[in-house]
Image (cartoon, rainbow, N blue to C red):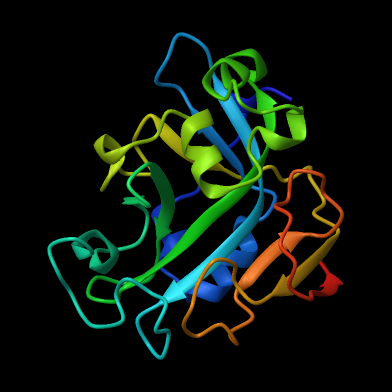
Amino acid sequence: MNILELPVLERAFYVRPTLDVAQDLLGAVLVSTEGPDIVAGRVVEVEAYHQDGDRAAHSYRGRTKRNEIMFREGGILYVYFTYGMHFCMNVVTEREGVGAAVLIRAVEPLAGLEIIRQRRPAARRDEDLTNGPAKVCQAFAVDRRHNGLSLVAGPLTLRRDAGYRAGKIATSPRIGIRESVELPWRFFLDGNPYVGKGKRAARSRSG
């Protein structure tokens, strides 16, 4: 597979209902062309966040300086800093004025594995390189510089792999939140070894 020949997801893909975008991102390929070599990974786990009724969303209480990016038109990155040490990468969704995004929780490395290993020296196994949202940002060298970056024209893109079959998609409540924990808005490829080790019960469906 020539990763750079995969078509970049167009803006229209993102300007749709957030839960649809979240599930359709599974199997897509995240590609970084910022360095001398390509770094790429298949999206295997995501979480959806939305201003409407989702108290865990940064956008729940309205637009602020911190979350302003979430309210822009879909197709850009919302990157935030958490716990004073980690970055998390989110795909902004829906139309301008709606505060919604999809957190990329885990990817399966496809290219640039040695670069990823260098950026993630604490990982004991390859399966631990990118099986968490902060780990993904470290592996792809994503930080606050990427906040607001276009996913359509930027050096970081999401691409469609039409030849890939996702198989079963599992759902569960989201991980590491204290509010709206009942919402089953975590989606992942069932059985993929790069999915994070969430302990909440999941249910599967055919993808």
Question: Is residue 72 at least partly visible in the picture?
Answer: yes
Q: Quadrant of residue 207?
A: bottom right
The front one of 8 and 56 is 56
Check the picture and name the quadrant holding the N terminus: top right
x%, y% of residue 62? 21, 80
> 201 above or below 40?
below
Q: Residue at x 68, y 31 (%)?
A: 109
Number of residue marks: 0
Q: Position of residue 133 (x, y in %)?
A: 53, 48
Residue 143 location in percent, x, y?
A: 33, 36
Residue 53 pos. (x, y %): 41, 91
Give the left or right position of residue 23, taking residue 134 as reference.
Answer: right
Left-right relation of 39 to 196: left
- Is 17 placed left or right of 85 in the picture? right
Identify which residue, 148 or 194, lies in the foreground. Answer: 194
Visible residue check, residue 8: no
Residue 182: which quarter of the image? bottom right
Farthest-out residue, bottom: 53
Seen from the viewer's position, the closer of residues 206 and 53 is 53
Q: Residue furthest left?
A: 65
Q: Which residue corresponds to the image point at 64% horizontal and 80% vertical from the top-left?
A: 184
The residue positioned 24% from the left and 83% from the top of the image is 61
Question: Which quarter of the picture shows residue 194?
Answer: top right
Left or right position of 66 against 115: left
